[in-house]
Amino acid sequence: MLGTALAIVIVASSNLWLRSSASGHVYSAADVPEAPVALVLGAQVDPPAEPSAFLAARLDIAKELYEAGKVKAILVSGDHAEWSYDEPGAMQVYLIARGVPADRIVLDHAGFDTYDSCSRAKHVFGVSRAIVVSQSFHVPRAVAVCRSLGVEADGVGDDTARIYKPMWARGEMREWGAAVKAAWDVATRRDPVFLGPHESGVETAVARG
């Protein structure tokens, strides 16, 4: 019983931290304040290199933000641990096919999870202010992590993927446990899987805007 009570306290406190950190920083695409860059967090890519419905919805928001002048560049961050599976590459192709200029898109091939994407945005790509884009159940965690790592982040969440009810429900349930991992990552300030030297891609893309 003591262990169960402790687990409940940890989960509840982690989620309370997350909600508090993100409070006031989640907007609609129309209302979000401008920022130099949109950070689009990766999600599943289906064969042959097609963004899943969840990922496509995120990319559509990023395109909307770019076309509205809310951002000058888009940083797509996802998993490319294996050559046969390339989230950032698929995200880039999707955006270019829909009219986003290639020179405004920057790829982060080592965004293996939310913490890594936020940490690399800050420490590798030099991002200090961003609009983070994901599904609405995920955005508060992404905003909280990015802000805790020194990125002045606001978030825009997609709700169109709610039509995929089982997957959406799993995503919502997953967030309770993911909040604990996020709190631990932020508290320990672990390095991302790959840190690496500074990359100037975002700065160059923003300057072109």
Image (cartoon, rainbow, N blue to C red):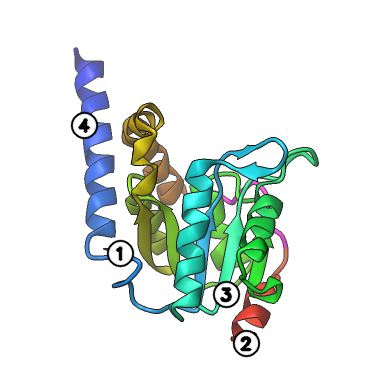
Say which of marks 1 and 2 sits in front: 1
Range covered by the magenta-colored residues: 191-196
Indicate left or right for 107 with 4 as reference.
Answer: right
Quadrant holding the N terminus: top left
Say which of marks 2 and 4 sits in front: 2
Name the residue: 20% across, 16% down. Answer: 2
Helix, strand or loop status at disc 3: strand
Q: Which residue is mark 4?
A: 9
- Give amino acid for label 4: Val
Magenta stretch, overall SS: loop
Question: What's the CA distance linking mark 4 and mark 3?
Answer: 40 Å
Q: Is residue 128 visible?
A: no
> What's the mark number on residue 28?
1
Please tell me which residue lies in front, 127 or 35. Answer: 35
Magenta segment includes 73: no
Question: What's the CA distance linking mark 3 and mark 1?
Answer: 18 Å
Question: What's the CA distance linking mark 4 and mark 1?
Answer: 32 Å
Question: What's the CA distance linking mark 2 and mark 4?
Answer: 46 Å
> What's the mark number on residue 73?
3
Answer above or below: position of 180 versus 2.
below
> What's the mark number on residue 207?
2
Residue 47 locus on image (x, y percent): 69, 35
